[in-house]
Amino acid sequence: MTAYRIQPDIRLDGYLLRGRATPTVRQLDEVGARADSLREIRGVAFLEQMKDSVRSIDRTRYDVVVLACVGGAVQAMLHGLARAWRGADARPVVVTGYVGVVYEKLADGLLLRHGADVVLANSRHDADRFRAVYRGVGADDSSVVECALPFLGGAPYTGAHTPYTVVFAAQPSVPESRADRTYLLRRAVEHARRHPDREVLIKLRSKPGEHTTHIEELPYQKLAAKAPGGLPANCRLVYGNMGEVLDRTDLMVTVSSTAALESLHRGIPTAVLTDLGIREVLGNHHFLGSGCLASWDELDAGHRPEPDPEWLARQGVAADGDYEQAFDVARARVTALRTADRLPPLTPYYTARTAPGYLPGILARHGLDPQGEPVAGHADAPEETGGLRRVARETVREAARGAYRHGVQRVAPAIRRWGQL
């Protein structure tokens, strides 16, 4: 989505970095991710492809590389690309960003992304914070470019639907405890029972066994299955594209999900819950000053938050038509870099000198030595050769992933709890 925002008329080759958070075919279809080619690949194999891409006599094979990964993966790929392209006459422009509601790991996440030619910020608010982090460590902040969230859009909200629809946007890791997650589920169910003329949808990001970038140890599906009396007829779990769910939403309710920004962009009444407190660990402190903070008690009584226009503008989600121009600066920056006679080498802030106790571990997780070179033998295992996995292979791998994730989500937390007894 970011690639198409930067330049709509492109050929896009997608490489899915193999790992815990590799999206499934269903997840890709759900969000409408589209590419001219798509394959799953290990980091070292991707770097080898990028190394080959600059060996062309006439021009580089790729004009732009968008790194849409978690911070550690971005840092590893930046170091790997710097080694792969060392001495090349020309190379692609490297773009990355920190997408979503950035409420935690601000410094960590940003410094792991430093070194890219362009670091996209979701809003004016984020651009100011991103530059401050880079300046604070004495790093170049010129790579930070203000744009907007790449997945905003959809028709503006025009009024109540029939039935009136309340959507609770669940998050995989916020809140974390069973008690808190059970509480939020119970309040959504109680809202449905208090208002039988309404439909209450609990929007989930993934099905059991699937992953996003955050580990979900207590899926709402399992909590709902144990809910006393079950879910009422006007309350149900839903999946699918968030944009399609928002098409029928009259009130968005969440703790701190990016869905709140999507909803606010459309002008849909949006409530950021205060029931569990306004705390950094929950991320709802990000919405201070938004006018959207509210409790379930207030919502049950009919309260509808009114967002602050100035806050919306600083967050880049104001529904005033400016969104179509939000990527103009990023597009111009990428074009200028792409047409430059020569680009400087990629130079991440983290090096063997600035982070000798941190960087080697990040690189090692992706098969790279402390200099960013592939570890001997790491690239020898066979790769898939076409498209995504074949159906049979996908079935086997999904089963293996399910077993692994069961260990992460169930066995490991249980062991940790036992160790605290």
Image (spheres, helix red, strand yellow):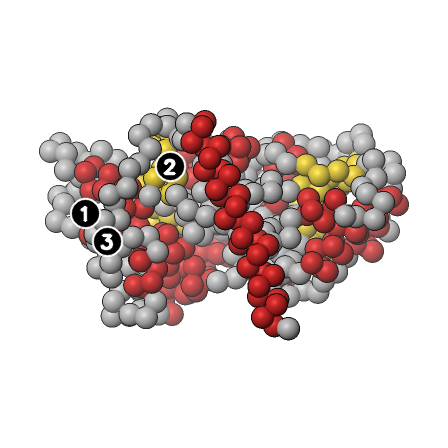
160 left or right, relative to 173: right
Marks 3 and 1: which is nearer the front? 3
Residue drawn at (14%, 37%) of the image: 55
Q: Check whether the beta carbons of the residues at disc 3 and disc 1 lie within 8 A of each other.
A: no
Q: Amino acid at mark 3?
A: Val
**Image quadrant occupied by the N terminus:** top left
Instruction: Name the residue: 39% across, 43% down.
Output: 18
**Circle 3: is it few (<14), some (14-19), or many (20+) Cα within 10 Å?**
some
- Residue 381 position in % (x across, y down): 28, 41
The residue positioned 56% from the left and 49% from the top of the image is 406
Frontmost of labels 2 and 1 is 2
Return the residue at label 1.
85
Q: Secondary structure at mark 1?
A: loop
**Mark 1 belongs to which amino acid?**
Trp
Above/below status of 277 relative to 191: below
Res. 232 in view: yes
- Position of residue 244 in the picture relative to residue 214 (left or right): right
Q: Say which label, 3 or 1, has the lower sequence index.
A: 1
Q: In the picture, residue 420 is in which quadrant?
A: bottom right
**Distance from Cα at disc 3 to Cα at disc 2:** 20 Å
Q: Secondary structure at mark 2?
A: strand
- Label 2 and label 1: CA atoms lie apart by 22 Å
Residue 280, position in %: x, y? Answer: 60, 65
Residue that appears at 83% across and 56% down: 297
Q: CA distance from mark 3 to mark 1?
A: 17 Å
Count of marks placed on residues: 3
Does residue 387 appear to the left or right of 230 in the view shown? left
Q: Position of residue 131 (x, y in %)?
A: 40, 61
Residue 313, can we see it?
no
Disc marking residue 375:
3
Q: In the figure, 174 relative to 397: above or below?
A: below
